[in-house]
Image (cartoon, grey):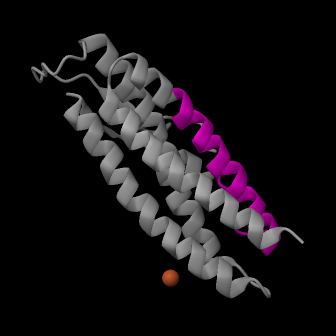
Amino acid sequence: MAQAALKPELSDEPVSTGIDEAAREKIAQALSAILTDTYYLVIKSHIYHWNVVGPMFHAIHNMTEEQYTNLFQAADDIAERIRALGHKAPIADAAGPNQAVVSMDASAKSAHDMVADLIDDHEAAIRKMREAADMAEEMSDFVTHDLLVGRMTYHEQVVWMWRSLITE
Ligand SMILES: [Fe+2]
């Protein structure tokens, strides 16, 4: 999973929605890390979409296409939630996702190993989202909590489908 998080920039926007400034900053930072994971999965799913070979080609080719399409839309939703919290949408820096992409070993795997790798990444993303959802609810940010519950629902379904594909 991607190590480097996109860094949110503090904004001067006078948000007064009942979530204090410190809480909004913490939630924006957590969402930025989730945005990084989401983009990382967009790219990795795309690479496997192109490079998968073997008897599972058709299933993996089609499932990855559905997933990178969903994940790309989700990245937009996550970034726009960061904006609604009064923070700038994060901008990649030198230690950000470009570096993660360069170090991504996504091309020389069997179809089974590609799916197992995606399961690992989706589960890591879910664990991070669960922590952030818990924190958002504690800080009365029910909108972020709701967004993350929706994303976890999707990722958990994806994990179930991938496991079903490779379980003998
Ligand atoms: Fe395609």
Q: Position of residue 101 (x, y in %)?
A: 56, 53
Q: Position of residue 164 (x, y in %)?
A: 76, 68
Q: Is residue 31 visible?
A: yes
Q: Quadrant of the N terminus?
A: top right
The structure residue drawn at horizontal position 38% and vertical position 42%, both measured from the top left corner, is 147
Q: Is residue 114 left or right of residue 168?
A: left
Q: Is residue 150 above or below residue 161?
A: above
Which image quadrant is residue 26 in? top left
Q: Is residue 125 left or right of residue 56?
A: left
Which image quadrant is residue 105 in? bottom right
> Magenta region's main secondary structure?
helix
Q: Is residue 57 above or below residue 71?
A: below
Q: Nearer the viewer, residue 145 or 70?
A: 145
Q: Is residue 164 left or right of residue 124?
A: right
Q: Is residue 127 magenta?
A: yes
Q: Is residue 35 magenta?
A: no
Q: Quadrant of the C terminus?
A: bottom right
Question: Magenta segment range?
Answer: 104-131
